[in-house]
Image (spheres, rainbow, N blue to C red):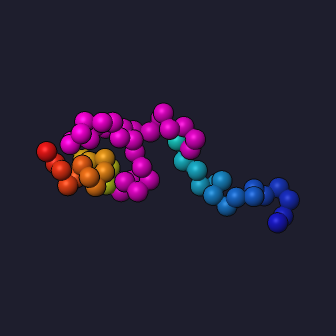
């Protein structure tokens, strides 16, 4: 490894919320009402996410 380079390739790709979970957007689950925080897997469709888990999605109650 060359000197002066970071040991992790991902260091240059961090977003503004890296390490700061309090700054992530959140919303309430439509089924259970508990708060759910933004997840990377929901990045493309965060506006359509309604349920915090598969269990809540199945039991829309």
Magenta stretch contains residue 19: yes
Residue 42 in the image: x percent, y percent? 37, 54
16, above or below 53, in the image: above
Q: Quadrant of the C terminus?
A: top left
- Considering every residue shown, the one lying at the far left of the view is 61
Magenta stretch contains residue 57: no
Q: Nearer the viewer, residue 9 or 21?
A: 21
Q: Quadrant of the N terminus?
A: bottom right
3, above or below 51, in the image: below
51, above or below 20, in the image: below
Query: For this view, does 1 lie left or right of residue 60?
Result: right
Residue 8 in the image: x percent, y percent? 70, 58
Residue under the point 58% across and 41% down: 19
Q: Is residue 19 visible?
A: yes
Residue under the point 39% across and 41% down: 37
Query: For this view, does 17 lie left or right of residue 7?
Result: left
The magenta region covers 18-44
Residue under the point 58% across and 50% down: 14
Q: Nearer the viewer, residue 35 or 1?
A: 35
- Considering every residue shown, the one lying at the far bottom of the view is 1
Residue 30 in the image: x percent, y percent? 21, 42
Quarter residue 3 falls in: bottom right
Q: How many marks?
A: 0
């Amino acid at each position: 490894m060359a000197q002066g380079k970071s040991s992790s390739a991902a260091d240059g790709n961090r977003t503004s919320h890296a390490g700061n979970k309090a700054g992530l957007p959140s919303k309430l689950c439509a089924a259970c009402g508990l708060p759910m925080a933004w997840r990377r897997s929901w990045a493309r469709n965060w506006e359509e996410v309604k349920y915090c888990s598969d269990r809540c999605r199945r039991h829309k109650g």
